[in-house]
């Protein structure tokens, strides 16, 4: 079984297009994701910027889930979304 066979089987089984993941098999190393965030208290706006670096010429698809927690209570104030 090749990586392409595995990718095709996973795509067929789940009814999704996984072609974007094929670049993972042709790129050496592991990408690094860094972040920067800022909060404007006056506007009540939170900004999050993610940056990816890898040996690939194009960005690699990396699923990310994001939500916000209250610093004091630990309760979720913005539901987690993928």
Image (cartoon, rainbow, N blue to C red):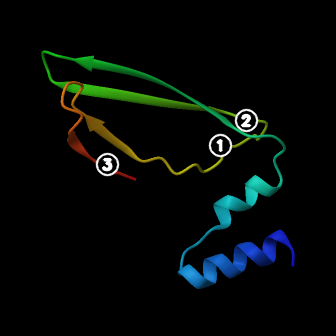
Give the vertical position of 40 relative to 19 (above or below): above
Q: CA distance from mark 3 to mark 1?
A: 23 Å
From the image, tell me which residue sits under label 1.
59
The residue located at (86%, 74%) in the rendering is 2
Mark 2 falls on what kind of element? loop
Side of 64 where 29 appears, left or right = right
In this rendering, the label closer to the viewer, 3 or 2: 3
Q: Foreground residue, 18 or 10?
A: 10
**How many residues crowd mark 2 within 10 Å: few (<14), some (14–19), many (20+)?**
some
Q: Are marks 2 and 1 in contact (CB under 8 Å)?
A: yes
- Residue 75, position as x, y percentages in the image: 20, 39
| Residue matched to label 3 | 80
How packed mark 1 is, by other alpha carbons closer than 10 Å (few <14, some 14-19, many 20 or more), is: some
Which quarter of the rendering shows the N terminus?
A: bottom right
> Tag on residue 54?
2
Which badge, 2 or 1, comes first in the chain's sequence?
2
């Amino acid at each position: 079984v090749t990586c392409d066979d595995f990718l095709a089987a996973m795509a067929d089984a789940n009814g999704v297009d996984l072609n974007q993941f094929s670049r993972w098999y042709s790129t050496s190393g592991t990408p690094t994701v860094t972040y920067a965030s800022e909060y404007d208290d006056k506007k009540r706006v939170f900004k999050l910027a993610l940056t990816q670096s890898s040996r690939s010429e194009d960005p690699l698809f990396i699923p990310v889930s994001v939500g916000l927690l209250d610093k004091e209570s630990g309760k979720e104030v913005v539901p987690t979304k993928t």
